[in-house]
Image (cartoon, rainbow, N blue to C red):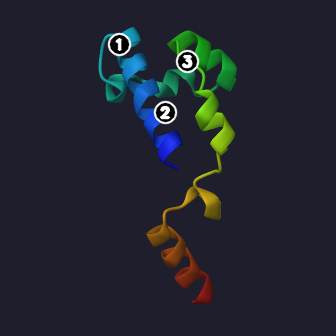
Amino acid sequence: MHDRLADALSLGQVLCDLLGGDLLEVDYHVHAERQLDEARAILGYPPKSAKAQAAGSPGAFERAGMSRLQQEYSAGLARD
């Protein structure tokens, strides 16, 4: 997890520098209909590092992509 987080922060900084501004100022809706690779190319988003790729990339709703607290919360929802 720490490799993926460090990589995301680093890539975010690179992208901010390329775009010349804050990532929260980007209108991502303009790119919503594009394929991911096309949007990444237009924005100049660099690829993930080898360490981050090796760590995998589980989705936000996959157990491996959740923090311990999120996993506990999710387990509680499943019991209810």
Give the x, y percent position of residue 34: 65, 22
Q: Secondary structure at mark 2?
A: helix
Tag nearer the camera, 2 or 3: 2
The residue under label 3 is which amino acid type?
A: Pro
Residue occupying the point 59% across, 19% down: 40
Give the x, y percent position of residue 52: 59, 36
Q: On the image, numbered disc 1 is attached to which residue?
A: 17
Q: On the image, numbered disc 2 is attached to which residue?
A: 7
| For residue 12, above or below residue 65 | above
Which mark is first along the chain, 3 or 2?
2
Using residue 4 as the reference point, say whether residue 35 is left or right of it: right
Q: Secondary structure at mark 3?
A: loop
The residue under label 2 is which amino acid type?
A: Asp
The residue under label 1 is which amino acid type?
A: Asp
| For residue 77, above or below residue 67 | below
Q: CA distance from mark 2 to mark 1?
A: 15 Å
**Rendered-image quadrant of the C terminus:** bottom right
Q: CA distance from mark 3 to mark 1?
A: 12 Å
Dot 3: few (<14), some (14–19), or many (≥20) neighbours within 10 Å?
Answer: few
Which mark is first along the chain, 1 or 3?
1
Give the x, y percent position of residue 43: 51, 14
| For residue 72, above or below residue 24 | below
Q: CA distance from mark 2 to mark 3?
A: 11 Å
Q: On the image, numbered disc 3 is attached to which residue?
A: 46
Residue occupying the point 64% across, 25% down: 33
User: Which dot marks residue 42?
Assistant: none
Dot 1: few (<14), some (14–19), or many (≥20) neighbours within 10 Å?
Answer: few
